[in-house]
Image: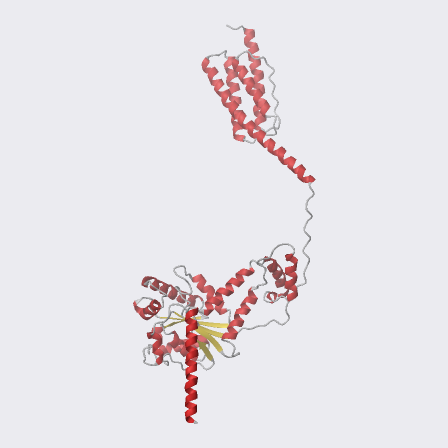
Amino acid sequence: MPSSSDVTRTRRRVSRNQIFTNLLARSINSKALVVNVRCYCRIRTYIHAAVCVLLLGLSCASRVDAFTDSDRTGRAAGRLTSGSTAAAAALSDQVGGPGEDASLLKWVSGSMEDVDAASSIAMADHRTLLQEQTEAEVTSLVPSAPPSPPKPPLELDIIPSQPIAIPDKCVFILGTGRSGSTSLLDAVNQLPNYLIRGEQGGAFWYLYVAWRMLVSSAKHAGEFQSYAKAAAERFGDRPSGWLSFKSVKQIYEAYAVQKKLPWFNDMHHSRLTDAARAFYLAAYGYHGSGIVSGFKEVRFVCGRAFPSPSCNYKEFDNFLRFLRSLCTDVKVLFNSRSSAAHTDNMKLGNMLARNGVINDTAQFEADLNVTHSWYDRYVKEHPCCGFRVLMEDMFNPEKNVTLARQLLKFLGESTRRKISFVRMPSWSTTDSSSRHDLYKPRSQDRDPFQLRRHRRRLVAADAAATTADGGATGDNG
């Protein structure tokens, strides 16, 4: 049985340990940089020894700059506070049984594990910080490369006389094929100042693709585009596309000494559009002002120019936007049959099957439905430049007169003019044009050997004709 003096001394030691423990917990929670804990008491029991060892371990770990793992530090502080309180209560009540000792030792073990982990993290952060400081000091001793000289300002100027080539008015007929597009072309050509041409194998689709690729290539030449924007602010958008040779050459020289320029070009969207207009003007609009030019084509449909099943209306609208940029005033006639069913478009399906264009009837019908929906949507969204023409209305005596009047009004012509949709003979007549429907077209272009053989045949035919003419002339003499 311990004496009262021993109990008093023990309580004083525990009280001092609890004070130091609370100070340590508050220091950890406040993320103090340095925690100094000293154990001034003499330890007699192993429980007090464990508490003191823990305090000394935390003191060593706290000599680093700061703890980075706040969760582990918080748990260690909590265990430290609760453990010290339990130890004080146990000793104040003179309890030293094995249960309390085991509980306190378990707390000491867990707290030391958290302290070790937090100490390791803090020491690692401290070493990283020292390493970064050392590298910064070494880097400061190495002389840095001199900054690149500023880009010299360039004197931008434009070509004074810019060619402007754009026809006044154009008419394009877009059809699905075997839907009366040729008869519609002839009806429009009955107007005195109109000259609409026939098909050209979808050539303007490839012109659109080339124009789009050239416009896209301009995005890679950021060096030129930066100066083009500056020129646009000074001269305007379209004139900025016509910079002089001196300006473009200066731009290239300014960057050629700094880096490689594999994509350098001076493409400009306005000048590329002018180039497309110039091409159309030379091909179709060369007769001058007052003459309405244009063409008809049956290949700008889903499944042909627009591959299925990925064809979409946005691409179709972009293509028509390109066509409408070729002339000042563009009118587009969308021609088809009223139905997209395969049974109602048997002639078109058979022709495309012979040419190897389609091999799936269901896909053909689906593509035709998509094309019809494009036509209807575009006319609805752009009534000023789109007009829908159905083949059944063209050859119906009860509707074609009204259709002709509406068509003339859409084109801006007098409705008193007379045009007919049946002036041309049909494909079913027995004239020479009916061979177009009977002979089997080639599914692909001729190879070079076939072309050479065809040329030899033409040369032989010309030679035979010349010989025959010479003999006839001799007989007559």
Residue at 34% x, 78% y: name it: 434
Residue 167 x/y as whole percent: 52, 74
In this picture, residue 136 sits left or right of residue 44: right
Residue at (68, 59) in percent of width and height: 153
Determine which quarter of the picture holds residue 172: bottom left
Give the x, y percent position of residue 382: 45, 67
> Is 42 located above or below residue 287 in the figure?
above
Q: In the rendered image, which quarter is residue 371 located in?
A: bottom left
Task: Identify which residue, 14 or 200, lies in the foreground.
Answer: 200
The residue lying at 57 percent from left, 67 percent from top is: 271
Task: Identify which residue is drawn at 49% across, 67% down.
Answer: 207
Q: Quadrant of residue 348?
A: bottom left
220 w.r.t. 446: above or below: above
Percent x, y for residue 277? 53, 71
Q: Is residue 188 visible?
A: no
Image coordinates for residue 116, horizontal then vertical, percent: 54, 25
